[in-house]
Image (cartoon, coloured by chain):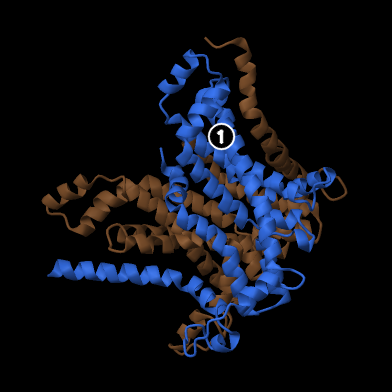
Chain colours: A blue, B brown
C-alpha cells in the first residue's frame, strides 16, 4: 500500500516536471497559431480559440527580411559545413586512432583542447582574415569558419569511436594489399555509420543554432542566417509577439526535428564525454 | 610491411583538417592573445591594457555576472539533472517526458533569449501572471536591473538542465541492477541505496558535467544578446557579449582582445584538467 502510494507520487512529480518543462515552448506555439487579440491577456486563456497560420505566413514573407530567405541561407551554410567537417575530422580521427608517430599524445591533446575555446577568442582575427581573403560577407567564409570550428570536437569524438573498432579486419585487408585510404573508405567508414550520424547530428545542430559567427561574418540582410534575423526582428518589431513567436517556432523546428528523428544518435554524441 | 610512401601519404589524413584548424582556430586564438598585450597605438604594455580593461565598469560588471551565473546555474542544473535522471529512470511514459527535458538543449539559444523575454513579460508572461496569484504586481522582469539577470539565469536553466540530465541518465544505466538488489536484501531503504550506491558511482559523471557546465556558462552569448543586449544599463552584461560590443560595435580590437583573453583564461582553467584526463 505504501509502496503503491510512493510510486504514484513519483509518477505525479515526474509528469508535472516534464509538462512544466514544455511550458515555454508551448507558450510560443500557442501564441504563434492565434491572433494577438486572443492572447493579449495570456496565451493560457483558451476562450476564444481561433486557429490561424497568418503569423507564420507573415514571418515567412516578412517584407525586407523574409524568414524564408534566412532559412535558405542557414541551410546553404549548415549543410556543407557539416558534411565537410565530419569528413575531414573522420580522416584525422582515423589517423589519431591507428597511426603511430612521435608526440602523438600531445598533438592530440592540443587539438582537443581547442574544442573548449570560446568563439570570441578567434572573432577579430577571423574577421580580418576573411576580409583579406575577400570572403567577408560571403556564405563561403561563414562555411569555412564553421567547418574549422567543428573539427576539434569531431576529431575527439570520432577518434574515440575508431579506437574501439576491432583491428583484425583492417589488418586482413592490409595483408591483401589495401592502402590506408582504401581501408579507411571501404572498412572504417561503413563500420562507423552510427558514430558518423551522431557527429553529423551534433555538428548540424550546433552550426544551425550559432549566432556569433554569423554576426561577425554576414552583414547584408539578404545573406543573413535565420537565427541572425531573430534579434533584428526583435529590434524592429519590438514586442510584436505574433511575429516573434512564429519566427522562433520556425527557426527552432529544424534542430528540434533533427533531434526528434535521431534522438538516439544525439544522446550517443552528447554522452561521449563519459564514454571512457 | 608498409611501403615507404605510406608514411608520407599518411600525412594526407591529417593535412586538410589541420590546415583549417590552424588557419581559422589556432592562429587566430594566438593572434588575439598577442593583440591583448598591446595598446591601440602599438605599444607593448600588457599590464596597463589589462588594468585599463578591468577598471572599466562594464567589464567588472560582466565578470561579476559570469560568476553569479555560475553560482546559481551550476548547482541548480547539476542537481536538477541528477534528480530528474533518477526520477525518470523507471517512470511510465518516460520515453515521452525525457525528450521534453532535452528540448532546451536543441533549441537555439537565440530563441532562448526571446523565450526569456516572453515568459517574464508583464502582460503575456506566465511567470508574472502566476505570481499575481500571490499578490505580486506583474512587471517585465528583464526591464528591471534587479530582476533581469535572474530571469536570464532561470532561462538558461531551462536550456541546459537537459545536458546534466542526459549524462546522469547514461551514468545511471551503467550501474548494475545487482547492487541495488543486494542492498535491498541487506535491508537498505531506497534513500540509503541512493546515497551509498548511486551518488558515489555517479561521481565521475557529475564531475564532467560540472566542468562542461561551467565552460558553457562562461561562454554565454546568444541568450543575452537576443534578450537584453546586456541591459538595462550593464545589469546583464557578460564577458562574451562585452567582447562583441568592444570589437564589433566600437571597433576597439585591443580591448576586445583583452576581454576575449580574460574569457579564454577562465575557460581554460576548467577545460585543461578535464581534457588532459579524457583525451589521453
- Residue located at (16% from left, 68% from top): A4
Question: Could you tell me how many numbered marks the image carries?
Answer: 1
Res A241 → quadrant: bottom right
In this rendering, position of residue A6 left or right of residue A266: left
- Position of A97 compared to B200: left or right? right
Q: Find residue A261 and report its horizontal and vertical position in percent.
A: 46, 55
Q: Is residue B276 visible?
A: no
Picture quadrant where residue A165 is located? top left
Q: Height in image: A190 above or below B220?
A: above
* A252 left or right, relative to A164: right
Compared to residue A229, the image places residue B139 above or below, namely below
- In percent of width and height, residue B262 lies at 66, 50
Which quadrant holds the C terminus of chain A? top left
Up-down: is A191 above or below B236?
Answer: above
Q: Nearer the viewer, residue B159 or A265?
A: A265
Residue to which mark 1 is pinned? A90
Question: How far across and how far down the image is residue B202, in percent?
Answer: 34, 48
- Residue at 69 percent of width and 78 percent of height: A238
Label 1 marks a residue whose chain is A
Q: B57 or B153, which is in the foreground?
A: B153
**Residue farthest along the right direction in this orientation:** B41
Say what secondary structure mark 1 lies in: helix
**Percent x, y of residue A65:** 74, 68
Amino acid at each position: 500500500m505504501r509502496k503503491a502510494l510512493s510510486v504514484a507520487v513519483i509518477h505525479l512529480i515526474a509528469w508535472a516536471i516534464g509538462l512544466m518543462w514544455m511550458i515555454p515552448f508551448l507558450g510560443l506555439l500557442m501564441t504563434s497559431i492565434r491572433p494577438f487579440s486572443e492572447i493579449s491577456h495570456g496565451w493560457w486563456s483558451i476562450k476564444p480559440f481561433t486557429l490561424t497560420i497568418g503569423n507564420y505566413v507573415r514571418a515567412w514573407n516578412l517584407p525586407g527580411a523574409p524568414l524564408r530567405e534566412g532559412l535558405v541561407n542557414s541551410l546553404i551554410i549548415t549543410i556543407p559545413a557539416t558534411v565537410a567537417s565530419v569528413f575531414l575530422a573522420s580522416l584525422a580521427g582515423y589517423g589519431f586512432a591507428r597511426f603511430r608517430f612521435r608526440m602523438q599524445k600531445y598533438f592530440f591533446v592540443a587539438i582537443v583542447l581547442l574544442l573548449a575555446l570560446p568563439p570570441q577568442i578567434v572573432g577579430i582575427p577571423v574577421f580580418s582574415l576573411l576580409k583579406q581573403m575577400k570572403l567577408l560577407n560571403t556564405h563561403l567564409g561563414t562555411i569555412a569558419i564553421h567547418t574549422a570550428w567543428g573539427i576539434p570536437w569531431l576529431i575527439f569524438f570520432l577518434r574515440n569511436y575508431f579506437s574501439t573498432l576491432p583491428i583484425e579486419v583492417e589488418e586482413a585487408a592490409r595483408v591483401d594489399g589495401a592502402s590506408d585510404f582504401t581501408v579507411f573508405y571501404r572498412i572504417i567508414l561503413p563500420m562507423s555509420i552510427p558514430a558518423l550520424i551522431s557527429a553529423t547530428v551534433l555538428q548540424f545542430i550546433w552550426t544551425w543554432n550559432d549566432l556569433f559567427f554569423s554576426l561577425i561574418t554576414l552583414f547584408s540582410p539578404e545573406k543573413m542566417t535565420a537565427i541572425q534575423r531573430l534579434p533584428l526582428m526583435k529590434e524592429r518589431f519590438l514586442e510584436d509577439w505574433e511575429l516573434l513567436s512564429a519566427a522562433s517556432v520556425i527557426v527552432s523546428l529544424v534542430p528540434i526535428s533533427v533531434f526528434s528523428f535521431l534522438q538516439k544518435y544525439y544522446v550517443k554524441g552528447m554522452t561521449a564525454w563519459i564514454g571512457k | 610491411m608498409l611501403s615507404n610512401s605510406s608514411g608520407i601519404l599518411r600525412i594526407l589524413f591529417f593535412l586538410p583538417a589541420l590546415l583549417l584548424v590552424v588557419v581559422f582556430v589556432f592562429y587566430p586564438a594566438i593572434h588575439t592573445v598577442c593583440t591583448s598585450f598591446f595598446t591601440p597605438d602599438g605599444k607593448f604594455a600588457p599590464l596597463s591594457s589589462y588594468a585599463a580593461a578591468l577598471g572599466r565598469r562594464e567589464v567588472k560588471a560582466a565578470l561579476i555576472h559570469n560568476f553569479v551565473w555560475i553560482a546559481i546555474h551550476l548547482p541548480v542544473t547539476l542537481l536538477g539533472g541528477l534528480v530528474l535522471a533518477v526520477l525518470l529512470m523507471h517512470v511510465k511514459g518516460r520515453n515521452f517526458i525525457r525528450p521534453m527535458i532535452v528540448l532546451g538543449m536543441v533549441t537555439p539559444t537565440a530563441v532562448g533569449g526571446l523565450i526569456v523575454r516572453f515568459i517574464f513579460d508583464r502582460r503575456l508572461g506566465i511567470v508574472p501572471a502566476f505570481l499575481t496569484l500571490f499578490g505580486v504586481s506583474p512587471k517585465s522582469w528583464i526591464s528591471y536591473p534587479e530582476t533581469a539577470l535572474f530571469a536570464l539565469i532561470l532561462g538558461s536553466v531551462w536550456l541546459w538542465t537537459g545536458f546534466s540530465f542526459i549524462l546522469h541518465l547514461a551514468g545511471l544505466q551503467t550501474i548494475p541492477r545487482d547492487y541495488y538488489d543486494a542492498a535491498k536484501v541487506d535491508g537498505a531503504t531506497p534513500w540509503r541505496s541512493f546515497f551509498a550506491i548511486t551518488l558515489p558511482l555517479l561521481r565521475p559523471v557529475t564531475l564532467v558535467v560540472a566542468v562542461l557546465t561551467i565552460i558553457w556558462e562562461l561562454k554565454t552569448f546568444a541568450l543575452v544578446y537576443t534578450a537584453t543586449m546586456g541591459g538595462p544599463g550593464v545589469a546583464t552584461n557578460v564577458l562574451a557579449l562585452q567582447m562583441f560590443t568592444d570589437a564589433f560595435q566600437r571597433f576597439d580590437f585591443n580591448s576586445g582582445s583583452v576581454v576575449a583573453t580574460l574569457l579564454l583564461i577562465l575557460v581554460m582553467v576548467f577545460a585543461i584538467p578535464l581534457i588532459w584526463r579524457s583525451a589521453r
